[in-house]
Amino acid sequence: MAKIISGKEVSAKVRAEVKAECEQLKAKGIHPGLAVIIVGDDPASRVYVNNKKKACAEVGFVSEEYALPAETTQEELLALVEQLNNKPEINGILCQLPLPKHLDEKAVINAISPMKDVDAFHPSNVGRIMIGDYHFLPCTPAGVMEMVHSEGIEVSGKNCVVIGRSNIVGKPMAMLLLHENGTVTICHSRTQNLKEICSNADILVAAVGRPKFVKADMVKEGAVVLDVGINRDENGKLCGDVDFDEVAPKASYITPVPGGVGPMTIAMLMKNTLKAAKIQNFH
Ligand code: NDP
């Protein structure tokens, strides 16, 4: 039976470290600040934004929320980003995605100052990740790596398979595993022999967005299985991309949903904001 890597525990440790460092910064007169922009009234986005604000309060950051109406124009949104780029009290800026259809997400991401881009979505930060010379890592893949490190799991030389190639999860996830000398395969919807490829993985990351997609016959005995998915099953219950009940007996380590990668994402956002505050004040 696999050992469960608890995102609740690992994220609590990360948040405690951030809090301790934040206190040290405050003693030097530096108050890390995160601005969160939300446009429209998407209920899921609202939950995410509230969780981010709560996490900021817990670690001692200043948080500012900019809740804009759904009919906000591109110009208004870009003007706000520009204003926050120039605001010294704000070290990190994030714009909760998805944006309403009439707004250009790419243009908004590009407008955020790369030094305040704590989601690490700006092309300059993405490029820095590619060459391994980065300030910030995208929060979800960084959270997965933090869980891997928390158990002392060796990546070097391992067969790593990432299912999913999105810009926010799959691609950067593969890059982080590659940086640690994993032999990485990225799978997607056009991949042939998915089952065969996955069954060779020593480390399998599922970022597919399909409930219980990864079954036991896709998993090698003793594999490390990391589940990024957040889905609802047929009964409306929260579940991952991995069929936990089937896969857990076969894996050596597994992350649960809920209580796995999810809580890590916000903890890593706090870590990035702290780093942004340090860079902006000490460099
Ligand atoms: P996307 O929808 O952007 O990407 C899904 C990827 O899965 C795509 O690359 C797609 O391939 C691939 N895929 C879809 N169907 C199949 C299939 N049948 N076989 C193989 N590959 C397939 O999702 P995200 O990357 O944004 O998110 C993935 C999951 O992670 C979601 O459940 C999301 O909710 C969750 N998530 C969780 C976070 C957290 O904090 N824990 C943060 C972000 C996301 P193709 O490119 O060919 O279409």
Image: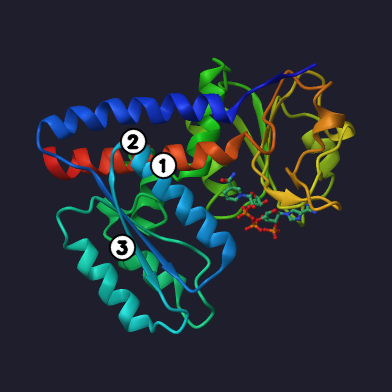
Looking at the rendered structure, the kind of residue marked 2 is Val
- What is the x, y in percent for residue 205? 67, 37
In the rendered image, which quarter is residue 214 located in? top right
Q: How far apart are the alpha carbons under marks 3 and 1? A: 22 Å
* Residue count near mark 1 (Cα–Cα under 10 Å), binned few <14, some 14–19, many ≥20: some
Q: In this view, does 227 lie above or below 52?
A: above
Q: Mark 2 points at which residue?
A: 59
- Specify the quadrant that holds the N terminus: top right
Q: Give the mark nearer the N terminus: 2 vs 3.
A: 2
Secondary-structure class at tag 2: helix
- What is the x, y in percent for residue 105? 45, 71
Q: Is residue 214 above or below residue 169?
A: above
Residue 180 can be seen, yes or no: no
- What is the x, y in percent for residue 228? 64, 42
Looking at the rendered structure, the kind of residue marked 1 is Ala
- What is the x, y in percent for residue 37? 38, 64
Find residue 55 and name its label: 1
Secondary-structure class at tag 1: helix
Q: Give the mark nearer the N terminus: 3 vs 1.
A: 1
Q: Name the residue under label 3.
A: 112
